[in-house]
Amino acid sequence: MLAAMLPRARRKRDKRDERLLTSRQAAERLGVKLETLYAYVARGLLRGVTKNGAGPQGRRYAEHELEGFLSRRRWSRRVVTSAVSSTDGGRLLYRGHDAVALAERASFEQVASLLWTGEVGRGEEWPEVAEEPIEAAVRAAKTVRGAPPLVAVQILVAALAVADETRTAIDAQSVRTTATRLITRLVAAFAAVRGTPIAASARGPMAARVLSALGGRPGTASNRITGRALVLSAEHELNASTFAARVAASTEADPYAVVGAGVATLSGPKHGGMTDRVDAIFRAPSSPEEEVPLGFGHPLYPDGDPRAPPLLAAARGAVERRSRALEALCARVDAMAARGRPAPTIDVGLVATSLALGLEPGLASVLFAFGRTAGWVAHAIEQYGTGELIRPRARYVGPALEEG
């Protein structure tokens, strides 16, 4: 049967090969000049069929091969374009708004609206969370007691998805509604996993909800510090976790899967896990003197990560929560500056925030994750709108085909 099928397949391929285009037609199909087309042939990227000893202009090109070449070139040259944020010029902009300035005057909810819609929100409170939708997720997360906090967050995101029957809708409005539900339930569920009554994490401003879920004591000053950290964590262009989230969105995976991909990637020690590493250093009895300590120097910001100074300033101002660890962190920041060494990154700023708020070890990265959900969702909305699959190509550098 297979043998009978092969001739038909071959005849179909031969018929397609007969659809040949002239050099000029092929160049027009590819959108290039004739000289560029000939260069592709010379480099072996295209095969031109030469008849009767004709030169380059007499070649003919199989239409299906040109289409395949176009597809390969489209993916190999793909650059993700985005209107969500920018890190150019040493500043972090959220849709054209300075993120540091936003952190001083806007709530997390308002900034999430900006990232998702292009308009700063009016300050409406997000929906209250009932216990029933999060119960199963909380039970699932409690099965891994003792695991790092970000692991609990990953489990909660996956488990919460099961309770949301409308999660597969990916039009912009539906995603915004789903995202609000996801974030509010995630924060309340994390509080429940930690054994904290969810009442304080189920209603009110998100900064207070998050602070309560992390075990902090909500109050005007503490809420302001937490809100600042959430806003400055919300988005940072195409970092590793956001790229993972966009790839997931490009497959039209639902928003929970998108956030799950983001959290999983954030947990790595070279990304959000760096926050945990910095946290551990400054909570240790004696922190090592490194030439360039972890959490200092950001490749995108030669003059310093703009997110760190406002977080450090807020932590320094929380005099009632000064601790040995926070004193050590501030002293290291000052010493690095005096020596002209690299400036602190957001990791140091988030750890300072965590110490100022009196949070337990490992929770600064969860604060980071809660904030970054807004950015992952913003990129998901943008990616869903393109309808494109992100599929980079690999440049093969392995062994050649072994003959025989």
Image (cartoon, rainbow, N blue to C red):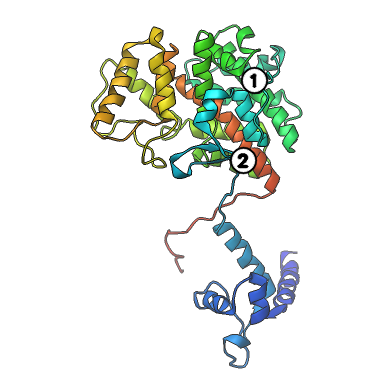
The quarter of the displayed image where residue 312 is located:
top left
Q: Is residue 103 above or below residue 194?
A: below
Residue 302 placed where, x, y %? 36, 41
Of the numbered discs in the image, which one, if any, rests on residue 184?
1
Image quadrant for the N terminus? bottom right
Q: Are marks 2 and 1 in contact (CB under 8 Å)?
A: no
Taking the image as shown, residue 143 lies to the left or right of residue 304, namely right
The answer, for residue 168, to whether it is visible in the render is no
Front in this rendered view, residue 357 or 362: 357
Foreground disc of the pair 2, 1: 1
Front in this rendered view, residue 377 or 116: 116
Gap between marks 2 and 1 measured at Cα? 22 Å
Q: What's the residue at 46%, 69% (across, down)? A: 403
Q: How many marks?
A: 2
Q: What's the residue at 57%, 86% (across, down)? A: 56
**Residue to which mark 2 is pinned:** 248
Q: What's the residue at 48%, 19% (across, down)? A: 147
Q: What's the residue at 47%, 58% (across, down)? A: 395
Q: Report helix, strand or loop for mark 1.
A: helix
Q: Residue furthest bottom?
A: 52
Q: Is residue 70 above or below residue 34?
A: above
Of the numbered discs in the image, which one, if any, rests on residue 37?
none
Say which label, 2 or 1, has the lower sequence index.
1
